[in-house]
Image (cartoon, coloured by chain):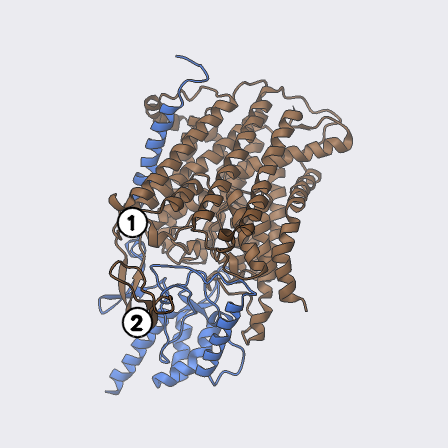
Chain colours: A blue, B brown
Amino acid sequence: MSTLPHRSLLRPALVLFLALSLLTGLAYPLLITALAQALFPAQAAGSLLLREGKPVGSALIGQSFSGPEYFWSRPSATAPLPYNAAASGGANQGPTNPALLRAVEARVAALRAAHPEQPGPVPADLATTSASGLDPHISLAAAGYQLERVARARGLPPQALRSLLAEHAEQPLSGFLGEAQVNVLQLNLALDELAAGKRAARN
Amino acid sequence: MNAQAWMLLCAFLAVLLLLAVPTAAWLARVMEGRFALGARIEAPLYRLAGVRPQEDMGWLRYALALLLFNLLGTLAVYALQRLQAVLPFNPEGMGAIAADSAFNTAISFASNTNWQGYAGETSMSYLTQMLALTVQNFLSAATGIAVATALIRGFARGSSAGIGNAWADLTRVTLWVLLPASALLALFFVSQGVIQNLAPYQQVETLEALQYEAPRTGPDGAPLLDADGKPDMQPQQSRSQTLAMGPVASQEAIKVLGTNGGGFFNANSAHPYENPNALSNFAQMVAIFLIPAALCLVFGRLVGDPRQGWTLLAAMTLLFVLAVIALTHYEALGNPRLAALGVADGGNLEGKELRFGIAASSLFAVITTAASCGAVIAMHDALTPLGGAVPLALMQLGEVVFGGVGSGLYGMLVFALLAVFIAGLMIGRTPEYLGKKIEAYEMKMVAIAILVTPLLVLGGTALAVMADAGRAGIANPSAHGFSEILYALSSAANNNGSAFAGLSANTPFYNALLGVAMCLGRYAVMVPVLAIAGSLAAKKRLAAGAGTLPTHGPLFVTLLAGTVLLVGLLNYLPALALGPVVEHLALFGH
């Protein structure tokens, strides 16, 4: 066989590119899809949360809440509506951007107006947007900040909400991996359930 | 840095080292062709391709093979994007990608940059994500590892005409390292909540109805304008949320292992479906550094002196830890202007996910830019000024602090050659590295490899700030806007791919400028590196004498880290002063 330096490189390039493409671009993702569906079907499909058999959201994706009877999520910068899980993204506002300062000022004012019983500074996560616009969590401080307002709107004793929050609070793994947080959608679903249970008990 | 941040950093480095040692052993075995079962499985493929894996290629032939292979990849990614509307696996009916964006993305993924001008979930079909983007995640990583292996052979061999076989190198590392590791990691990701399906986007009914405003659209889908020429905004109400779906985990695994960084979704690893919790995040961080760290040890093994590999790894780790301390410090400090508005002290949470917090977000930002990964879990545009200067500087150092898979090692070896050259000048002896005389030819190639990227970054930035089309993309006013442009060019030319994402870069101007920067930043470095490999392989290996500068141990670690820092500072200090430094003074000065 010839060992000339100009011996064609084209055939090996084409054949190997084609073979490795089919392997890594079709066989591999399709095999992982099949294995994922078999081993972890709920996670592979998006960790959907069902209520009365209907999907009401995902355990991993946040939702927007603005009514007084729910715990509120962090502000979201997705367009055209917040928590748009078909178009993720952040606000990308730098720390000296006047638009950021105006937005934070407005959020702080709205939070203070809704929580007159809270004299202190507003929890940082409630005043700032997340990276994905889909952040499912708030800090325990942010949940505590809203607790009395939710209790008031629901006509529930704050103590009942405190134990609900404690049930749903997540702590860092081994003390350093992760943050102290609560999943807002799951907390609100539990809150709806608690309120429904209380109503049923009264009737 | 608080206790949590220190514990996270220590745990990260411990797990990384623990995994890097066996990975290096396996990588060395595969790249030396000592995996016999693998060779038998490869044999029919080689026959079909007309490849003789034992054929030793000269450096030029090796380079041409890689360039041709990468060119095919670029063309395929371009074609698949342009044709995706008529191809299968497109349940959301994504249309063809515009030519300029497709050009940019094709170069971006072939060059291991994975700069993304597009938003994945609103533009790419599942077929494009798999057969175009995932494939290049593998093959661009394999290309980098092949070049690094060829350079290692240049040092390890004596009086040899060749530096290995490009086809065998590409095939072996893809089949026996990248694929199995990605499969394992992908399944771990799914177990944590990363999605993996081919279903259409999922509709759910939300707990609460949402009021918002959206532009009214005409029958063609274009927004209608009101009398002032602004989009006619109408109040809307929605009780449904659309969850973007897709084969995410399989792409996520190689995205981090191959230091690619191109997210399936626009929000990249900040998206909960790409990176659901602290544990998946820890795995992503380790995966990004795993192969770059292991390749240092492979280098030590194959040149017959493991201390040489540990020395490179130590120099990288030194620079890395300094960067983590700096970035975490400034992010934890937070934004004094928000504190003045009545926001509680909790660090700079703007643009960060709560589940990652300050410590992990800061660590990830350093890892992703120290390595040429570019995945993000926090929006770098929203980092504090000096916090944001750290990723910028890490890219500008040439992506040699761990760096890209393969490219980090060969980049660092280029700096090692420069370091022994400078030391040689100081002590008045011909510089040597691992018994190879470093002469004029090698130093010319070193100079090209080191100067190409600063030329692209600084020249490109100057061009963009002078052009109307360049300034039009800026999202944040004043010094931060300059930083956005500097970041984009630094990221593209050094093949990182992360962004100060406020910059509107999906325009013909930026698609073209950044496309050229990515292409030259990758291949105009790779080819001189292969030339060095060829030249070194042909030289005899000399025995170390009494006057030989030892290239292992703390002295050389310091010399090497110092050389990297010195070159970086000389190149970039004026530009950094105009962006992040000015903004820092505006934020914290009086």
| Quadrant the C terminus of chain B occupies | bottom right
Residue at point 46%, 77% (across, down):
A144
Residue B474: x percent and y percent?
Answer: 50, 57
Viewer-nearest residue: B262 or B408? B262
1 and 2 marks on the same chain: yes
Badge count? 2
The chain holding disc 2 is B
Judge left or right: residue A61 versus residue B261: left
Q: Residue furthest right?
A: B427
- Element carrying mark 1: loop
B457 or B366: nearer the eye? B457
**Which class describes the residues within 10 Å of circle 1: few (<14), some (14-19), or many (20+)?**
some
Foreground of the two, B211 or B537: B211
* Residue under pointer 2: B236
In the displayed image of the protein, which residue is found farthest to the front? B227
Q: Is residue A34 visible?
A: yes
The amino acid type found where label 2 is placed reads Gln
Q: Residue furthest top?
A: A1
Image location (x, y in percent) of residue B44: 32, 24
Residue B73's image quarter?
A: top left
Q: Quadrant of the N terminus of chain B?
A: bottom right
Circles 1 and 2: CB atoms closer than 8 Å: no
**Taking B110 as reference, is B299 left or right?**
right
Q: Is residue B302 above or below residue B277?
A: above
N-terminal label among 1 and 2: 1
Judged left or right of residue A147, residue A96 is right
Residue B95 circle label:
1
Residue A31 visible? The answer is no
Gap between marks 1 and 2, in whole Å? 26 Å
Residue in the image at 55% along x and 58% along y:
B481
Q: Amino acid at mark 1?
A: Gly
